[in-house]
Image: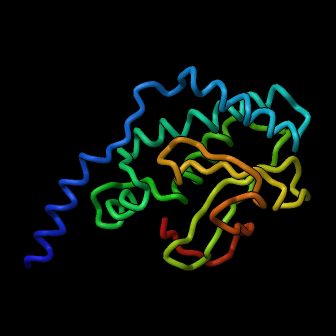
Amino acid sequence: MKKLFLLILITFFLNGCGSVYYKQIHTPKDDTKIEKLKKELLTVSDNPQEAQELAVLAVTYPKVLANRYHLVSPPLYHNFLVNIGQRKRGLCFQFVEDIMKEINKHNFDSFHFRWGRANADKLNEHNVIVVTGDKDDNFDDGIILDAWRNSGNLLFWRVKDDPEYKFKEWQEGDERIHSH
């Protein structure tokens, strides 16, 4: 009983300390990130209009989700809150699902979106969106869109350049758990 009480006390104490809230969804600082992502996207596709549209969406929409999820930082702590029922969403696979729903509203013709999964079926499993120009393009040359790892502040780079995870493409029908 003491352990449960201590766990609840720590949860409520930390809950307020690490809150992430984005008052502005698109800031001037984001313009630099959007431009960098657009340039990166243009290495897998030759459509500057769609690259710009996707870059804006990929940088800003995770902040909308972070606010909607009532995200707290660090991400693993937020996962804990989701897993004990204190938050409804905000695990990495939920970022992927919700961002893909938004992406699908835009009917991008110049990009192909894939599900990247690292550490399958382990407690540190991680899921991201991987963007390629075509479904037949090399997965490792795709661009990771990772909204979870930095609490709604998008990170992106090539799959093969990820400093922490070794992603593989998840295919429909693959078994997986969603640990974060």
Residue farthest to the left, as pictured? 2
In this view, the residue in front, 175 or 14, is 14
**x and y percent of residue 57 in the render?**
64, 34
Query: Residue sitting at 55 percent across and 60 percent down?
Result: 93
Residue farthest to the front, as pictured? 163
- Against 66, residue 15 (above or below) is below
**x and y percent of residue 53 in the render?**
72, 29
In this view, the residue in front, 82 or 42, is 42
- Against 5, residue 55 (above or below) is above
Query: Residue sitting at 32 percent across and 60 percent down?
Result: 81
**x and y percent of residue 62 in the render?**
53, 41
In this view, the residue in front, 90 or 42, is 42
- Against 27, residue 147 (above or below) is below
Query: Residue sitting at 59 percent across and 75 percent down?
Result: 176
Quadrant that contains the N terminus: bottom left
- Against 25, residue 77 (above or below) is below
Does residue 162 appear to the left or right of 61 in the view shown? right
Query: Residue sitting at 87 percent across and 47 percent down?
Result: 133
Does residue 76 appear to the left or right of 108 in the view shown? left
**x and y percent of residue 86 in the render?**
27, 57
